[in-house]
Amino acid sequence: MSMDHRRYSIKASLVVHRELRKRFPENAGQRCMYGAFALAHLLREMDFEATVVGGDFAIFVPARDGRSAAFHGFGGSNEPGTASHYWVESCGRVVDASTLFLHTTTDQDIVRLPVIYWPISQELPRYLRYSAIMRADKGAEFSTVLEQREKAAAVVDGCLRRLSGRALPSKQEVLDGPKYVFRTKAENAWSKAAVEYETNTSYGSPPI
């Protein structure tokens, strides 16, 4: 896997994250469809193939105080033709920065999470789950509703302006494969919990 794709994917993901926080300050964590379409657009601008995928998502996360841990994520959409969560598949990777919003979508004080850059060829671990139910054609419109299409276009334009600026996103942890949690468990609270859940099947099965 080209390091150029990795660097650009993570940089673009962080830019999209910041843009969503700016445009949707009240509920940015629930705007993953805007984020996924924007990220796919940015990747295609750099001639990387990118597909928006919709479905369910869950990740095992401990609380900051270490007293509890549970799965957090998005799932169970009841609206036909829609999904609870959207992410991007590009150059053999799942690329998803929605983990940076999870602390805003739960009433629990959870630890900081990495951006997802998971190799599609690798089986998903017990602590990270994706279940795809739909894939968007690269030429598909964001929505049939004009106002939503205009908002999506504005998000993309804002991301492009941020990418052209001098300020770079801060360094971010990246879950780039199964070795990450074992490599970082000594100094990373989330990795430590993920390893415990992955290796101890007595905790039960993942939700999806």
Image (cartoon, rainbow, N blue to C red):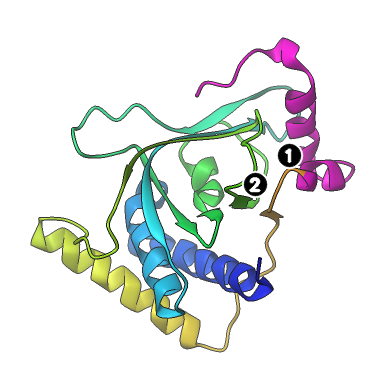
Q: Which mark is residue 190?
A: 1
| Looking at the image, residue 111 lies above or below residue 19 | above
Residue pictured at 63% horizontal, 72% vertical: 7
Q: Nearer the viewer, residue 70 or 43?
A: 43
| Looking at the image, residue 132 lies above or below residue 114 | above
Residue 138 in the image, given as x and y percentages of width and height: 29, 63
- First to last magenta residue range: 179-208
* Image quarter of residue 171: bottom right
Disc 2 is placed on an element classified as loop
Give the distance between the C-alpha atoms of the residues marked 1 and 2, in whole angstroms. 7 Å
Residue pictured at 65% horizontal, 51% vertical: 114
Q: Which mark is residue 29?
A: none
Residue 123 in the image, given as x and y percentages of width and height: 63, 37
Give, as a three-letter code, the residue at label 2: Leu
Hey, which residue is sitting farthest front in the picture?
A: 121
Residue 98 can be seen, yes or no: yes
Badge 2: residue crowd in 10 Å (few <14, some 14–19, many ≥20): many
Hey, which residue is sitting farthest right in the picture?
A: 186
Disc 1 is placed on an element classified as helix
| Main SS of residues in magenta | helix
Residue pictured at 10% horizontal, 55% vertical: 144
